[in-house]
Every structure is written in C-alpha cells, then in structure tokens.
Amino acid sequence: MATHQAGVRPPPRRALPSTQHPHKVGIVTVSGKVRWVPPVRVSHGKVAEMQRRAAVHFHVLLRLDGVDPDDPDALIPPPAGITIDDLEDAIHAAARQITVTTPLHPDRPQGWLIAWGEQVDVRRIDSSDGELTDGKVATYLAKYATKATEATGHSSTRLTAATVDDYADPGGDHVARLIDACWHLGRPTHTDTTGGAATADDRQASLDTKPNVYGGLRRWAHMLGCGGHFLTKARRYSVTFGQVRETRATYRRTEDDEPDDTITVGTLTYIGSGWLSEGDALLANTAARHRRESRRIGREELAHEAWLGVAA
C-alpha cells in the first residue's frame, strides 16, 4: 500500500497499485502515443443525504475494475493480487489523509481546512448469494437520495435580498445561523480601491482581481450552502445523464401507442418564477413566518404539558 503525507490528495486509485502489483498498463491513445496507467480503475456513484442536524452525509459506491490495454472501455475484473481488501484499505487511507484548503476569504485570509470526518463506514455490498446486482445497487442509492432541507425543518425557494431576513439570523437556531453564514460569506468582496485616476498597474490589478469564489453560497443559501445535484458519478460508472436523456427523448419521438387523432405538443414556454410583486412576496413570507412561530409555540406548549405531567 502506498503511503502519502497529510495534506496531499491521494485518491484510492493512486493507493491501489501497491507493491504487490507495481506494473502499469500501456494504452495507445488516438494520437498513437502510449499512455501508462495503473492496472486498476476506481469508478464511483455518490448521493448526498441531508440530515436533521443540517449536516450532509455522502453515500458512495466504489467499483474496482481492471484495465484492458486492447479495449480501455471494457469492464473486466482487477488483476490477480489486487482484491477488495486493497480497495477497502485504500478508502480508509484516503479518508485519513485527504485535506483541502479552501480559497482565501477576507474573513479568513488563510482559508479553511476541510477534511473527512471520523464517521467513515465502509461496507461490502452484495446479495444473499454473493452477487452484486443492478437492483441492489439502485436500491442502496435510492434510499439515500434525499438532498432536501425539509429534514431540517427549513423549506424555502431561492432567497433574495428581500426575503433572506425572514430565514437568516446570526442569533437564531442552527439553520438560521447557517443561512446567515452563507449570505455573509457570499457577499461581494471586490471594491474599487484605485481612488481617482488609475495607472496602468492599477487597471491591471483590477483585472487580475477575481470575484468572490464563495458567491455561490448566496445562490444556494436556501439549501444551507449545499448546491448542485444530489447525484454525481464517474463517467465510467454507468451511462451518462446525456445518454439517458437522449434515450428518453428518442422513445417519446418514436412511440406509436397513441391514437392517430392525438396531437402531442412538445414545446414548453417559460412564463416566470417567484412572486409577481414584492407585496405578494411579503404577504407569503409573513404568513410563513407566522406559521413557523405557531408551530414553535405549539411545541413549547406540548413540552410544558409533558413536564407538568412528569412533575405531578
């Protein structure tokens, strides 16, 4: 098993070609050059699960394949000497050693250090007869495909400057503080400091200054900063999403189950999203705030009645 220093990013695919199997496989590219790759390849499928405590758990399926130099796209077993035990050891090694320092931010010039948590649970997935089936994989991923904030008690559409104060509160509960942190960290940080007539160096410095890379936190503040699709995967793990969409569109175009007098309209027109006016938004958000307050008071009343029953 290869060893790596902390702070370096050694993904499992680098740790797997151990001293047991150090030789690489030569693959001829389209240009005719030979590219030397490890004898195994790791592909993944990952889903994000939002928990009640507003922490995101990632559930990942990792598949270990061999590499066929004559057919790089073929799915073959890994070579002898590299087993599922090596894959499991590589996963634990990667989780211990991988760290990432985020880009710089005015609130933290050195950036934030991000690493995997202590809860790394590696399990071997197979069926009762030891065979890994498509159904078992789909079932495993489907039960965790819930990257939605409803589990935390928060539910809102994309937030704007006019609506964020209804949900963000630096002194509020955990979710309110998370939303406030997203909005604060994602604020515009670039300002013009040239002050009057700018020299060529000043203009070049302004061009070299990048916008706040944390700006996406405001876009995804309603998701507590966790943006993107709930499912991501390696291209080699399965068919691409583009292929799935193309297959679905082809099926819709070629299906002949509909009667001859049925007309299918396949054109969608965007009308709009959100509220028609700020007044409508204010009324809706006020009603939502009153509803949340009523639920909070109700929970406190139930807790008080339960306490009185225990005290009696």
Image: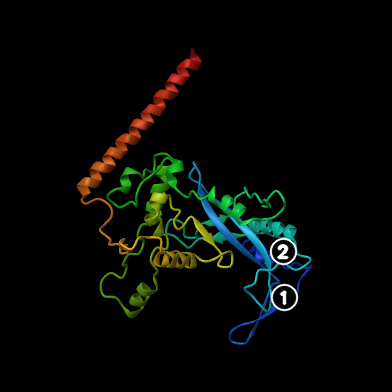
| Residue 118 higher or lower than 20, as above or below | above
Indicate which disc, 2 or 1, sits on the residue closer to the N terminus.
Answer: 2
Find residue 87 and report its horizontal and vertical position in percent: 70, 60
Q: Is 112 displayed left or right of 24 in the figure?
A: left
What SS does tag 2 mark?
loop
Residue shown at 72% from the left, 67% from the top: 78
Find residue 14 and report its horizontal and vertical position in percent: 67, 67
Which residue in the protein does label 2 denote? 3
| Residue 270 higher or lower than 197, as above or below | above
Find residue 269 and report its horizontal and vertical position in percent: 27, 62
As drawn, the residue found furthest toward the front would be 260
Tell me which amino acid carries mark 1: Lys
Which label lies toward us, 2 or 1?
1
Instruction: Say few, some or many: other residues with alpha carbon within 10 Å of mark 2 (under 14 / 14 to 19 / 20 or more).
Output: few
Which circle marks residue 24 in the picture?
Answer: 1
Question: Are circles 2 and 1 on residues that touch, CB within 8 Å?
Answer: no
